[in-house]
Amino acid sequence: MELISIKSPNEIRLMRRAGRVTAQARALAGSMVRPGVSTLEIDHAVRKFIESQGGTPSFLNYAGYPGSACISVNDVVIHGIPSRHIVLREGDIVSVDVGACIDGFHGDCAATYACGRISDEARRLIEVTQQSFWEGIQFARVGYRVSDISHAVQAYVEPFGYSLVRDYVGHGVGAKLHEPPEVPNFGPAGHGPRLMAGMTLAVEPMVNQGTWEIQVMKDGWTVKTADGKLAAHYENSILITDGDPEVLTVTEDGAYV
Ligand code: MF3
Ligand code: CO
């Protein structure tokens, strides 16, 4: 089994820088979400911004992925491929997932944005998904195990009648976009690796309005809810410390979306 890397103080400084650029790219993408904009336009802006900061988009060409961001509309859970044919409409909910690599270290984050006015149900789904991340990372501390985070996310979300995607999970992040350990968003507490200061994790609840079951489209990437209901996503890269977890994917202004 591959070991979980513990980042050195210098590596942590580099992770903070990558995290800041990634969060700024997410905020830029979010600010572009409005009716009439294509998901490809947002993708191009993300790429230009990351490159202007001396970075490279982590997802571009990853396992053949063709975009710089994943942009997932309504019943698309994750891995929506940006396209000039996908034009946002009033009432859509739009999940944007971005990664940036700077000086050898990755940041990875995502959030779901409203396109114009959205339904109350859609807004509640987005809010519960975001809050589930904060509930989960209350356990992102020395003395707990990975699945304590997983369990806290699930325990918060399910009473709302929503479900957690099983087929995709959070992960360690660092010199590679995906490192051990896996960080599921469901399961019993008290399992998995013990958390140690210097670990960096991407915690990313994917929450479905209906069933947790998903379907991968024929393009090999686009993941949709099996029942066609809405899905939301929220992700940040975090650092385990001797105290409270530190969110690495935060903008200069302190924004987490
Ligand atoms: N944030 C996603 C993840 O953590 C994005 C990966 S998309 C890919 O896995 F294109 F890079 F595969
Ligand atoms: Co991720």
Image (spheres, rainbow, N blue to C red):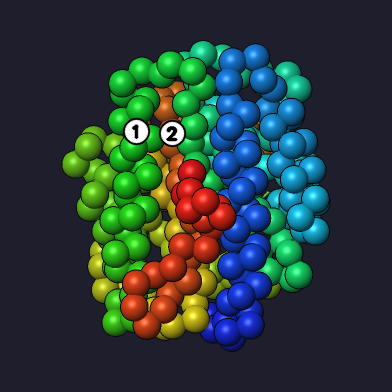
Check the image and report above or below for 21 versus 80. below
First in sequence: mark 1 or mark 2?
Answer: 1
| Secondary structure type for disc 2 | strand
Q: Hey, what amino acid is under mark 2?
A: Ala
User: Circle 2 sits on which residue?
Assistant: 231
Identify the residue shown where x is 72% and y is 61%. Answer: 101
Residue 129 lies in quadrant:
top left
**Residue 36 shows which numbered tag?**
none
Q: Is residue 63 left or right of residue 118?
A: right
User: Circle 1 sits on which residue?
Assistant: 125
| Residue 170 in sight from this viewpoint | no
Return the x and y of residue 155 as percentages of the image width and height: 22, 52
| Secondary structure type for disc 1 | helix
Residue that extends furthest to the front in the rendered view of this protein: 253
| Mark 2 lies within 8 Å of ligand 1 (Cβ measured) | no
Identify the residue shown where x is 51% and y is 22%. Answer: 115
Check the image and report above or below for 152 versus 34. below
Cβ atoms under marks 1 and 2 closer than 8 Å: yes
Q: Hey, what amino acid is under mark 1?
A: Leu
Residue 212 lies in quadrant:
top left
Q: How busy is the neighbourhood of tag 1: few (under 14 within 10 Å), some, or many (20 plus)?
A: many
**132 or 24: nearer the viewer:** 24
Q: In the rendered view of the protein, which quadrant contains the N terminus?
A: bottom right
Return the x and y of residue 69 as percentages of the image width and height: 67, 42
| Residue 251 in sight from this viewpoint | yes
**127 or 218: nearer the viewer:** 127
Q: How busy is the neighbourhood of tag 2: few (under 14 within 10 Å), some, or many (20 plus)?
A: many
Identify the residue shown where x is 49% and y is 77%. Answer: 199
Q: Is residue 162 left or right of residue 107?
A: left
Identify the residue shown where x is 45% and y is 59%. Answer: 203
